[in-house]
Image (tube, rainbow, N blue to C red):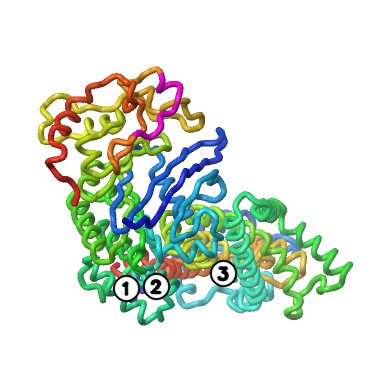
Amino acid sequence: MAKYLLQRIVYMILTLFIVASVTFFLMKLIPGTPFNSAEKLTPQQLHIMQEKYGLNDPVPIQYVHYIANLVKGDLGVSFQFDNTPVTKLLQIRIGPSAVLGIQAMILGALIGIVLGVVAALKQNTWVDYGSTFIAVVGKSIPSFIFAGLLQYYLGVKLGWFPVMFWKGPEYTIMPTIALAMFPISITARFMRTEMVEVLGTEYITLAKAKGASYWQISVKHALRNALIPVVTVLGPLAVGLMTGSLVIENIFGIPGIGEQFVKAIMVNDYPVIMGTNILFAALFVVIILVVDILYGIIDPRIRISGGKS
Amino acid sequence: MEKILQIKDLNISFHTFAGEVKAIRGVSFDLFKGETLAIVGESGSGKSVTTKSIMRLLPEHNSEIKGGQVLFDGKDLTKLSDKQMQKIRGKDISMIFQDPMTSLNPTMKIGNQIMEPLIKHQNMSKGAARERAVELLRLVGIPKPEIRVDQYPHQFSGGMRQRVVIAIALACNPKVLIADEPTTALDVTIQAQILELMKDLQKKIDTSIIFITHDLGVVANVADRVAVMYGGKIVEVGTADEIFYNPKHPYTWGLISSMPDMETNDEELYSIPGTPPDLLDPPKGDAFAPRNPYVMKIDLEQEPPFFKVSDTHYAATWLLHPDAPKVEPPEAVKRRQSQFPGVKVGK
């Protein structure tokens, strides 16, 4: 296991290096400079500014500098936020996004799994159709519509929750619900399909033939086997949620990372773009590792082959 | 002989998009204590449906027991509630399935799968159930059961898995064991081992077995009595000797002629022409009539009743009617009849 983990970590670092390199060169293809918008600089001033940040060097030289700093853990300083180090900017911004993402993920996965399992157990009844309806609605209606509806009804009309901003746990409830609609529908559909398939297998019939009760069959025998493919979908979905939803963060005025990311791209704030992207990639590879380890816990067949490698 | 299970005039239908499939049309048979009854017939003849219905394992959403009784221990199993049925499944009646590669839960340890019925039906503690599981594994011939009990199904070969399934089925010493083609998915040498094991265990725990198969070689090996099914009905029933050496129904003749024996020369092996009947719209009269080389006019008009051949042997064919013309059975059957009742098959 230790050897397997070590191997995986080496691959992860390699992946991150490739992501950083590709992003760097792609970013350099964006036209313009960080200093071309509102400042009304003379060409001379612009040249001085660019010289200061090393932007007049040839791209390969810039790349080597960047990677060298990256290895030291230095992501550079932001152009737009008064030379604040990017690491510090990310630290401030990742908190709200992560809290929101993790909450939405847990809520989404739990409700989705329950909906999917119930739909499969009550196949072709109104319960099943109801679950399908919720899933279709959740998937096809964009999250900002839910956000608006929640703000209007639960926030303004009923006054149950604060309409926006990020000042405490009660402020997280509505954005979490709005953001969870998508994972709910995805999980519910996957769970139902898998569950229906598992319930039709011979080992479920054998469990029935042993005298197992409905509850034992559904939970002990079927659920675990049906969860295996669902975990695959949930992993990448979790990253997407944790790294923030620009729309939801904007609507609810949450100082999250998604909002900052888009702003950085608009003004060519190269170090922030790079830093955020590398953070996303890092989260992604870590989540994939977690998913792979989860597989092993759920499915003994994968555990054995994983142990050998 | 004590009757342990009685099936009386069982009718089962499946509701499909095309209409109602009358899969079982008036099946009756008895199972005696300690015997092995083989049910043979081609695919779709209703063997599995009959036995699954005994345990009420048919899918609830599209199958329906239209009539008849399954009498066990003074109770009609078709009338029991789900809860009552759960108490019988795995305890009094248990089942072995066809494909050992798919009939064990891949994410559950073998031991836990064997312990389940023990804990459920015999109120054993986890520790006691585990000990019994090891004992059962040893009984079905799995080496190093103390280690194997903590392993998962994918660490077992097909034959070993079927032994585990047998161990699960026998965990609570059931009165009736239903084996639904238990050797079909296994290769021939493993087949023989599994059959030996089943015969051996049957003697030890004195259970009655219903053995479903389409392999007449297997039937000869295990069965005391044989019921031949065709088109959702039993067409002939008798002791193994009677069915093998003195069959009366033309369908049984066809089955036996299509089985190679020591005397089969290089002549082409017989096969029954035509296809099984469409049970969406079961034929009037004898369902086998369109494929029957000895067909008579009455076969197409009226269903034949059972004619008694001996106290244990009955066949549903108009050929046994006193007014029917005498016909010559096929060569292979005649060869066998000449040996009856000199040679014994089965046990």
Q: How many angstroms separate mark 3 from mark 2 (CA)?
A: 59 Å
- Amino acid type at circle 1 is Ala
Parent chain of label 1: B
Q: How many angstroms separate mark 3 from mark 1 (CA)?
A: 57 Å
Q: Nearer the viewer, residue B89 or B35?
A: B35
What residue would you read off at disc 1?
A: B133
Where is residue B337 drawn, in percent x and y? 17, 33
Q: Are marks 2 and 1 in contact (CB under 8 Å)?
A: yes
- Amino acid type at circle 2 is Leu
What residue would you read off at disc 3?
A: A275
- Amino acid type at circle 3 is Gly
Q: Which marked residue is nearer to the observer: mark 3 or mark 2? A: 2
User: Image check: A119 left or right of B134?
Assistant: right
Q: Nearer the viewer, residue A121 or A71?
A: A121
Q: Are marks 3 and 2 in contact (CB under 8 Å)?
A: no
Q: Do pointers 2 and 1 mark residues of a single chain?
A: yes
What residue would you read off at disc 2?
A: B118
Quarter of the image where the N terminus of chain A is located:
bottom left
Q: Nearer the viewer, residue B313 or B22?
A: B313
- Does residue B299 sit above or below A70 in this rendering? above
State which region is magenta.
Answer: B298-307
Where is residue B38 drawn, in percent x and y? 30, 47
